[in-house]
Amino acid sequence: MTYVICEPCIDVKDNACVEICPVDCIHPHPTDASDEYETVNQLYIDPEECIDCGICETECPVEAIFMEEDVPAEWEEYIEINAAYFQ
């Protein structure tokens, strides 16, 4: 399992989670991206780099970060959105 950033992060991108992440696995969406998620202005957690420490979850001011198994049903598509971003 890994952590997933969901809808509350869109257009917020506070970066508190980026600054506290011990393995630098949280990345912003580049403004010049040309993939299918280019309009989703949020942060992403690389599932291959994440060590599941949970520090980011407690630091997020908009409560947008969840353990994959705890993502609310209405935001389950963000599991794939986060994973696809790094493929």
Image: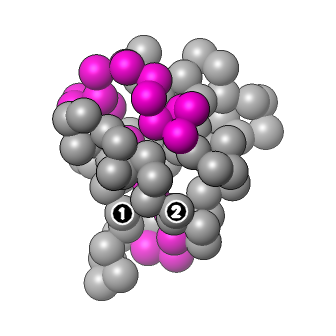
Q: Residue at x 64, y 50 (%)?
A: 61
**Is the residue 7 above or below the residue 24 in the image?**
below
Q: Main secondary structure of the magenta part?
A: loop
In the picture as drawn, the residue positioned furthest to the bottom comes out as 32
Residue at mark 2: 14
Earlier in the chain: of badge 1 and badge 2, it is: 2
* Residue 44: in magenta span: yes
Q: Residue at x 23, y 43 (%)?
A: 24
Q: Which mark is residue 28?
A: 1
Q: Is residue 27 visible?
A: yes
The answer to whether 62 appears left or right of 36 in the picture is right
Instruction: Tell me the quarter of the image containing the N terminus.
Output: top left
Q: Amino acid at mark 2?
A: Asp
Label 2 element class: loop
In this rendering, the count of numbered labels is 2
Which residue range is magenta in the image? 38-59
**Is the residue 8 above or below the residue 50 in the image?**
below
Q: Residue at x 44, y 29 (%)?
A: 55
